Image (tube, rainbow, N blue to C red):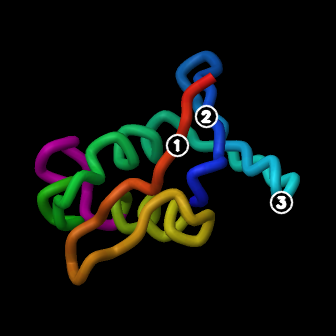
Amino acid sequence: MSPTWLGARLDGDAVFLDPAQARLIHVDPEAFAVWEQCDGHTAAALAHILGLSLRRVNRALKMLAQAGAVAADGERWRQSPLRWV
């Protein structure tokens, strides 16, 4: 996710907007919870912290990574920059 991305919360969900690419990404509450904790944790640690199965965490990470909202640093996950509106 580029630093120009914007984020907004809507009824528990979140949306990430990339104005440069005219791209909008819907993030459900579970994926958003995963995204919030991506500050250097592994997928296994995220599963433990959030009380989710590793499969569900990996599914959320895959979606978030494909969108550019997180990036892997080895086995650790980090958020991409986002400005809330």
The numbered disc on residue 82 is 1
In this figure, which residue is indicated by the disc labeled 3? 21
Total marks shown come to 3
Give the camera-side residue of 34 and 16.
16
Can you say whether 43 is above or below 22 in the image?
A: below
**Identity, as a three-letter code, of the amino acid under mark 1:** Leu
For the N terminus, the image quarter is bottom right
In this figure, which residue is indicated by the disc labeled 2? 7
Name which quarter of the figure residue 14 lies in. Answer: top right
Q: Please, what secondary structure does the residue beneath circle 1 have?
A: loop
Most extreme residue toward the top, as rendered?
A: 11
Contact check, label 1 and label 2, Cβ < 8 Å: yes
Q: Is residue 60 magenta?
A: no
Residue at image coords 21%, 70%: 76
Residue at image coords 41%, 70%: 71
Residue at image coords 47%, 50%: 81
Per the rendered image, the range of residues in magenta is 47-55
Residue at image coords 53%, 22%: 12
Contact check, label 2 and label 3, Cβ < 8 Å: no
2 or 3: tag closer to the N-terminus? 2
